[in-house]
Image: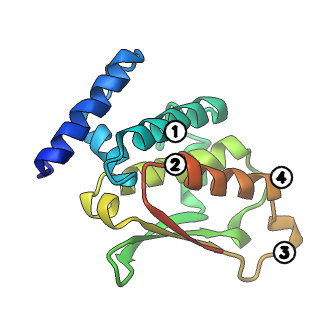
Amino acid sequence: MAVALSPDQELATKAFLDALSESGASCVSRATAIKFLLARKFDVSRAHTLWRQHEATRRREGLIRFEPFEDPLKTELETGKFTILPTRDATGAAIAVFTANKHFPNLTSHQTTLQGVVYQLDCALQSLETQRAGLVFVYDMTDSKYTNFDYELSQKILTMLKVSTSIRNGLIV
């Protein structure tokens, strides 16, 4: 389904794609451009910065290619550690939950856990409703033990959500 944009939003989309093309990233789709523009209220400069941060984070963390039907990502997804709930909050935002008591740092790498999170966020962001209404992220510490806690991973997830994800997000910790 095509997204209906105002004339100003159409101009912003063209400007965003032109800016990416000039920087050598000409393979970005219109749908991807709109996703980043929506996340930054169609401010082309801010959306371009977000896209650059997004791409840099994915390269740095090895989040380029996902094989959800192959291990280790398949096993990570089956843990249910991170999930997008099938319901939304009162404002229409999607709800994502990271259940800390299902995370065992000694059994999985940061890269695999981040792949599980990013893969599911990418799927959630295919929804225009999620792009427009945003996402509430719940970091559920209920019944967690010291062995479940991974400070560095927590920082990576929260930083990724804050500075490199193409979504307007609210955080609940």
Secondary structure of the residue carrying tag 1 is helix
In the rendered view, would you say 155 is above or below 37? below
Q: State the CA–CA distance, disc 4 to disc 3.
A: 13 Å
Q: Quadrant of residue 17?
A: top left
Secondary structure of the residue carrying tag 3 is loop
Depth check: give the residue in front, 132 or 144. Answer: 132
Q: Which residue is mark 3?
A: 145
Identify the mark at residue 118; answer none if there is no mark. Answer: 2
Depth check: give the residue in front, 75 or 169. Answer: 169
Q: Which residue is mark 4?
A: 106
Q: Earlier in the sequence, mark 4 or mark 1?
A: 1
Amino acid type of the residue that numbered disc 2 sits on in the rendered structure:
Val
Secondary structure of the residue carrying tag 2 is helix
Q: Position of residue 153 (x, y in %)?
A: 74, 53
Q: Earlier in the sequence, mark 4 or mark 3?
A: 4
Amino acid type of the residue that numbered disc 3 sits on in the rendered structure:
Lys
